[in-house]
């Protein structure tokens, strides 16, 4: 099973700042099989990025995914109030899908 | 537009069986193009993929629950189900159904989730 470890656990920022979230895999994940989700309280997760760097439909261009092999990054520039949420990475390279434990981005 | 909706008891007693159903509309559950998945989230925690079923009825499960879980497809009702036996408090949480593609994709469509509490 591929274990995904996200850091930091919590990120405290002010609106307008840039958030950088990390996702490290226990083994190489082919880049087309890595996604990022955003989740707000009481809601299902929403896919933001897939294939490491492709934004899903309707996702603003301030969300940028990058990385390769075992290290992946989600950057959120010019944080808007609606961006403060929980973020997860997920791999879909193997039959047993796995998620990172999440990074909470909170208002400072 | 694809819509998934979970249903089932919100309270299950310890050692009993948790049973949930996901109703699918706006898409053909018979299609061999998609996986139909169950994912759960304990309160205040992260997401755990439980298992999936394809159009053929074939299944894959998370090794951590494999001995206790069954996911079944009911094509006549356009729904799929989750059965988890011998539950404990650790099985409490929000259960989501979701769809992804056999060709490789993230979970594109999700239900709203249903809260299940394991308690006597």
Image: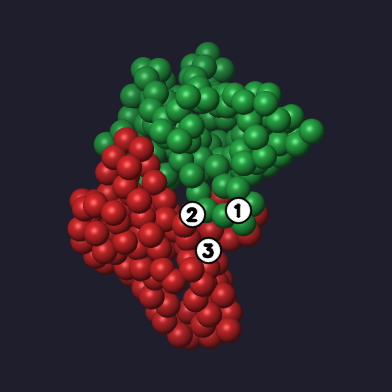
Chain colours: A red, B green
| Mark 3, residue position | A86
Frontmost residue, B74 versus A61: B74
| Viewer-side residue, A58 vs A36 | A36
Q: Are discs 1 and 3 located on one and the same chain? A: yes
At 27% from the left and 36% from the top, the residue drawn is B103
Mark in front: 3 vs 2: 3
Query: Which type of secondary structure does the marked residue at label 1 adopt?
Result: loop
Query: Which is more toward the observer, A80 or B69?
Result: B69
**Tags 3 and 2 both on a single chain:** yes
Residue found 42% across the figure and 30% down from its top = B61
Q: Is residue B2 visible?
A: no
Element carrying mark 3: strand
User: What label does residue A46 carry, if any?
Assistant: 2
**Residue B49 sits above or below residue A9 on the image:** above
Image location (x, y in percent) of residue A107: 58, 79
Where is residue A78, by image quadrant? bottom left
| Image quadrant where one finds the C terminus of chain B | top right
Q: Position of residue B73 (x, y in %)?
A: 48, 19
Q: Secondary structure at mark 2?
A: strand
- Please name the residue that numbered disc 1 is placed on: A43
Question: What is the C-alpha distance between the residues marked 3 and 2?
Answer: 10 Å
Q: Tell me if mark 2 has few (under 14), some (14-19) or many (20+) residues whose alpha carbon lies within 10 angstroms of its own.
A: some
| Mark 2 belongs to chain | A
Task: Tell me if B11 is positioned left or right of B107 in this view.
Answer: right
In the image, taking residue A57 as reference, residue B14 lies left or right, namely: right
Label 2 near label 1: C-beta < 8 Å?
A: yes
Q: Tag 1, which chain?
A: A
């Amino acid at each position: 099973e591929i274990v995904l470890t996200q850091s930091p656990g919590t990120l405290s920022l002010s609106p307008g700042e840039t958030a950088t979230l990390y996702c490290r895999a226990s083994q190489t994940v082919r880049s087309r099989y890595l996604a990022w989700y955003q989740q707000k309280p009481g809601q299902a997760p929403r896919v933001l990025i897939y294939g490491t760097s492709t934004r899903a439909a309707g996702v603003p261009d301030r969300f940028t995914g990058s990385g390769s092999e075992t290290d992946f990054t989600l950057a959120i520039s010019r944080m808007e109030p609606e961006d403060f949420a929980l973020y997860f990475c997920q791999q879909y390279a193997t039959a047993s899908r796995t998620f990172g434990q999440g990074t909470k981005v909170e208002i400072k | 537009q694809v819509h998934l909706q979970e249903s089932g008891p919100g309270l299950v007693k310890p050692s009993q069986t948790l049973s949930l159903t996901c109703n699918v509309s706006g898409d053909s559950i018979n299609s061999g193009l998609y996986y139909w998945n169950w994912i759960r989230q304990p309160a205040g925690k992260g997401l755990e993929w439980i298992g999936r079923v394809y159009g053929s009825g074939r299944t894959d499960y998370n090794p951590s629950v494999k001995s206790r879980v069954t996911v079944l497809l009911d094509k006549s009702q356009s729904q799929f189900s989750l059965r988890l036996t011998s539950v404990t408090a650790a099985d409490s949480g929000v259960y989501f159904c979701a769809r992804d593609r056999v060709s490789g994709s993230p979970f594109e469509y999700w239900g709203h989730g249903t809260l299940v509490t394991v308690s006597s």
